[in-house]
Amino acid sequence: MSDYQRRIRWMHEHFGIDRSVVDTFSPEEKRFRIAAMREEIDEFEAATDHHDQLDALVDLIVFAFGTVERAGYAEVFGEAFTRVMDSNMTKTVGPNQKRGSFALDLRKPDDFKPADLTDLVEGM
């Protein structure tokens, strides 16, 4: 578990919303967390200076890591991250029409294999 994740867990414990107290990750909480992350993306989009951009990105990561912890993925997140990044490293640089054809995007080659996370979430 990364230092960032430990700090998120500590924050959740501090406010009494950690998994040992509120162990259910409900559909209502999922909707809330999606709305919160979208709000931070909107704030990043609206930001006009580096301070506000950085603040929005940090808040987005806090909500994302908080969601990892609340959904019960904290213990497997590091391994999942490694597998997804290893898979991503097989991509090539080039425009991806799915996201607006930005030249510095990553594209999946024809033989792309997505990360297999099945064993990490079995029994959850």
Image (spheres, rainbow, N blue to C red):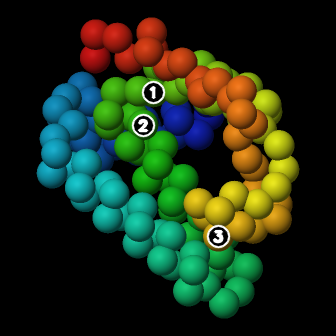
Q: Residues within 10 Å of mark 3 (few under 14, many from 20)?
A: few
Task: Report how far apart the C-alphas of labels 3 and 1 lie in the structure.
Answer: 32 Å
Whichever of labels 3 and 2 marks the residue nearer the N terminus, that label is 2
Q: Is residue 114 left or right of residue 11?
A: right
Type of amino acid at the residue the image marks with label 2: Val
Task: Report how far apart the C-alphas of labels 3 and 2 lie in the structure.
Answer: 28 Å
Task: Report how far apart the C-alphas of labels 2 and 1 lie in the structure.
Answer: 6 Å
Image coords of residue 98 (percent x, y): 59, 60
- Which quadrant would residue 53 be assigned to in this image? bottom right
Marks 2 and 1 close (CB-CB < 8 Å): yes
- Which quadrant would residue 94 be assigned to in this image? bottom right
Which mark is drawn over residue 20?
none
Q: Residue at x 71, y 86 (%)?
A: 49
Q: Residue at x 15, y 51 (%)?
A: 28
Q: Is residue 82 left or right of residue 60?
A: right
Image coords of residue 29 (percent x, y): 21, 49
Query: Which residue corresponds to mark 1?
Result: 74
Type of amino acid at the residue the image marks with label 1: Ala
Q: Residue at x 21, y 37 (%)?
A: 25
Query: Which residue corresponds to mark 3?
Result: 100
Type of amino acid at the residue the image marks with label 3: Gly
Quarter that holds the N terminus: top right
Could you tell me which secondary element the residue under label 3 belongs to? loop
Query: Which residue corresponds to mark 2?
Result: 68
Above-or-below relation of 45 to 89: below
Q: Residue at x 65, y 63 (%)?
A: 97
